[in-house]
Image: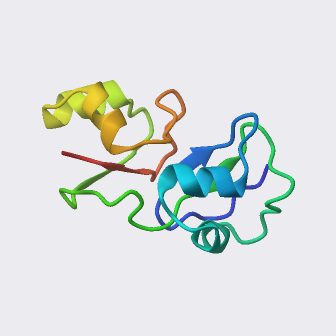
Amino acid sequence: MNQPPCPSGRFWRVEAGDTFYSIARALDITVDELIRANPGVDPLNLQIGQLLCLPEEFPPCPSGVYWEVSPGDTLYSIAQTVGTTVETLLELNPGIDPFNLQVRQKICLP
């Protein structure tokens, strides 16, 4: 699947039963915001495993500090480098797949 650029660098991986409405509710954003972040995606034909771009600054990152994923980065290596835990990174970054980080994806740091 050819993935268009995602300015936020943050994604939601579609799971069985996901709809634009259920994803927007889970993220506390509007369906329109999700649609604008994903031009060309048919909201009525989501595929399991498909990556949806999250709007900029979603969720708000309290620290305002991000890590941009480089090739070879893992949540564990990022946590070790910045002195936090994988659990904390997952809490700050809901919806990311810790086993499939994307190069240039932005990870909110504490």
Q: Residue at x 16, y 37 (%)?
A: 82
| Rendered image coloring scheme | rainbow
Q: Residue at x 63, y 67 (%)?
A: 31
Q: Residue at x 80, y 49 (%)?
A: 46
Residue 10 visible, this angle: no
Depth order, front residue of 5/49: 49
Q: Picture coordinates of residue 58 (x, y %)? A: 42, 60
Q: Is residue 40 left or right of residue 82?
A: right
Q: Where, by quadrant of the figure, is residue 6 drawn?
A: bottom right
Q: Picture coordinates of residue 34 (x, y %)? A: 61, 65
Residue 79 visible, this angle: yes
Q: Residue furthest left?
A: 83
Q: Is residue 105 left or right of residue 100?
A: left
Give the position of the C terminus as an image quadrant. Answer: top left
Count numbered badges in the picture. 0
Q: Picture coordinates of residue 49 (x, y %)? A: 72, 37
Q: Residue at x 71, y 43 (%)?
A: 18
Depth order, front residue of 53/78: 53
Depth order, front residue of 70/53: 53
14 to 72, vertically: above or below: below
Q: Picture coordinates of residue 30 (x, y %)? A: 57, 68
Q: Is residue 59 left or right of residue 41?
A: left
